[in-house]
């Protein structure tokens, strides 16, 4: 499962000493797990907006030299994984556009499902497109309304969008944050002194010493300028659909989403797995890093000792950034190495977040067996992935997913595991304290799409 994107925004008073460009750099650094193809920052000094963006990781795109060219009190930033549009410089964000009231810059996380319809409409109005991303569709909708007031332009555009979107938008003198009416993905509000901050996850706040205030609500727009912070509901209230896969895999463990800590939730998933799929074994090991907290939970719940039997090379990017299947498969051995002295002669419970195509799990199980393990029991802290996501997570098409076309027994045999257990949908939905089961989008497991 590929992440969507990460967005960040900061508004500081004009007299503040806050370096908004560097704060945005650190915020994006904390959100790097959400997008590893490109990075960009836009800064306003009250009169003009300057943007720097390029392909690569945050630390590769930005240096002290180019960050020092930014001067201003408002900034937005973006890290990208290309759910819509190819990975090239033109599709990197933030985007910069002119409208009737001046200039604005936009960074977007999510995916529109009515992009074809909207693009056709805008092309008939002779509005040009320079990218293949759906983010430019949002920008052009804001332009097409001919509004001079950016807040009205954002509201008018938002009312035409279907799908998943969170946005940070900056004019010369305002910072705006918007979440779509279904609220699929997180967008957090924070504060650092007299500065307000928006970020895809509040793990970005910890790095810069900011205080987490709350999650932006579905259908909400917040506007931050010299008058302070104002909030408006710009979309009708309806049934929210928070992406449950944020908790399974996408979000960082130190993030909180609607009051639920991701690491604690993953531990509870592991405990539930131990109840639903017990097994006699000697050790529990995670697939690092995404399976770690669930493996700790499985160990707690089962009483089987926790060990680190696979070593991850942290200088290698996630395997899915390789665009070809053959490269992705070869990179498993580069990314993970077995510790033979821990695995040899052991009955192993291997805990991971999901099975999508199954090729990575198959190679890992063989690797663990080759290291001398007697048995390998695979435990997955999500239900079988049956359907693609259309809301900002780049999954394979249904024909390329493994689970819809194979029984559990067939999957177990093909993987080479001694047993396989997925957490149930009811078990997964039941580990939360503050988010009711009906508030989640579980379409990748059930095929029941909220939009």
Image (spheres, rainbow, N blue to C red):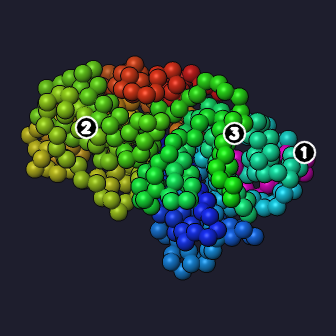
Q: Residue furthest right?
A: 125
- CA–CA distance between discs 1 and 2? 54 Å
| Residue position for label 1 | 124
> Which residue is outermost to the bottom?
65
Provide the residue span drawn in magenta: 122-135
| Image position of 180 (left or right of 371) | right
In primary-sequence order, the first of circles 2 and 3 is 3
User: In the rendering, at what x and y percent does residue 237 appear?
Assistant: 67, 27
In the picture of the structure, the residue carrying the numbered disc 3 is 232
Label 1 CA crowd tier, 10 Å (few <14, some 14–19, many 20+): few
Between marks 1 and 2 in the image, the one whose residue lies nearer the viewer: 2
Label annotation for residue 295: 2
Does the stretch in magenta take in 6?
no
Residue 387 placement (x, y as % from top left): 53, 28
Q: Position of residue 422 (x, y in %)?
A: 34, 26
Q: Secondary structure at mark 2?
A: helix
**Label 1 secondary element:** helix
Between the residue at mark 1 and the residue at mark 3, the CA separation in whole angstroms equals 31 Å
Query: Taken as a whole, is the magenta stretch helix, strand or loop?
Result: loop
């Amino acid at each position: 499962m590929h992440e969507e994107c990460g967005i960040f925004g900061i508004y500081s008073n004009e007299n503040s000493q806050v370096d908004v460009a560097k704060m945005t750099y650190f915020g994006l650094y904390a959100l790097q797990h959400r997008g590893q193809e490109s990075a960009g920052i836009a800064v306003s000094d009250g009169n003009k907006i300057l943007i720097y963006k390029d392909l690569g990781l945050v630390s590769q795109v930005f240096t002290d030299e180019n960050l020092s060219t930014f001067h201003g009190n408002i900034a937005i930033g973006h890290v990208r994984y290309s759910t819509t549009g190819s990975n090239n410089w033109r599709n990197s964000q933030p985007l910069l556009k002119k409208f009737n009231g001046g200039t604005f810059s936009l960074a977007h996380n999510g995916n529109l499902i009515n992009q074809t319809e909207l693009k056709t409409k805008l092309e008939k109005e002779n509005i040009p497109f320079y990218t293949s991303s759906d983010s430019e569709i949002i920008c052009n909708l804001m332009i097409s309304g001919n509004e001079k007031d950016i807040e009205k332009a954002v509201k008018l555009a938002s009312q035409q969008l279907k799908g998943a979107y969170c946005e940070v938008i900056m004019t010369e003198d305002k910072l705006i944050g918007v979440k779509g009416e279904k609220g699929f993905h997180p967008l957090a509000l924070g504060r650092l002194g007299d500065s307000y901050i928006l970020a895809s996850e509040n793990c970005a706040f910890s790095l810069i010493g900011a205080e987490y205030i709350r999650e932006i609500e579905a259908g909400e727009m917040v506007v931050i300028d010299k008058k302070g912070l104002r909030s408006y509901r710009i979309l009708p209230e309806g049934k929210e659909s928070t992406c449950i896969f944020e908790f399974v895999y996408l979000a960082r463990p130190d993030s909180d989403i609607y009051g639920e800590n991701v690491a604690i939730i993953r531990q509870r998933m592991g405990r539930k797995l131990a109840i639903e799929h017990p097994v006699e074994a000697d050790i529990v090991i995670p697939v690092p890093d995404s399976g770690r907290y669930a493996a700790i939970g499985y160990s707690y719940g089962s009483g089987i000792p926790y060990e680190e039997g696979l070593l991850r090379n942290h200088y290698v990017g996630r395997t899915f950034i390789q665009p070809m299947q053959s490269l992705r498969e070869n990179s498993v051995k580069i990314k993970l190495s077995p510790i033979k002295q821990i695995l040899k002669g052991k009955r192993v419970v291997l805990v991971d977040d999901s099975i999508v195509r199954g090729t990575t799990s198959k190679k890992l199980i063989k690797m663990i067996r080759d290291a001398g393990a007697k048995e390998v029991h695979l435990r997955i802290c999500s239900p079988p992935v049956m359907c693609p996501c259309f809301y900002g997570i780049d999954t394979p098409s249904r024909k390329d997913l493994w689970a819809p076309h194979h029984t559990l027994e067939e999957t177990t045999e093909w993987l080479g595991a001694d047993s396989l257990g997925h957490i149930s949908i009811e078990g997964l939905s039941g580990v939360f304290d503050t988010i009711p089961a009906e508030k989640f989008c579980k379409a990748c497991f059930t095929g029941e799409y909220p939009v």
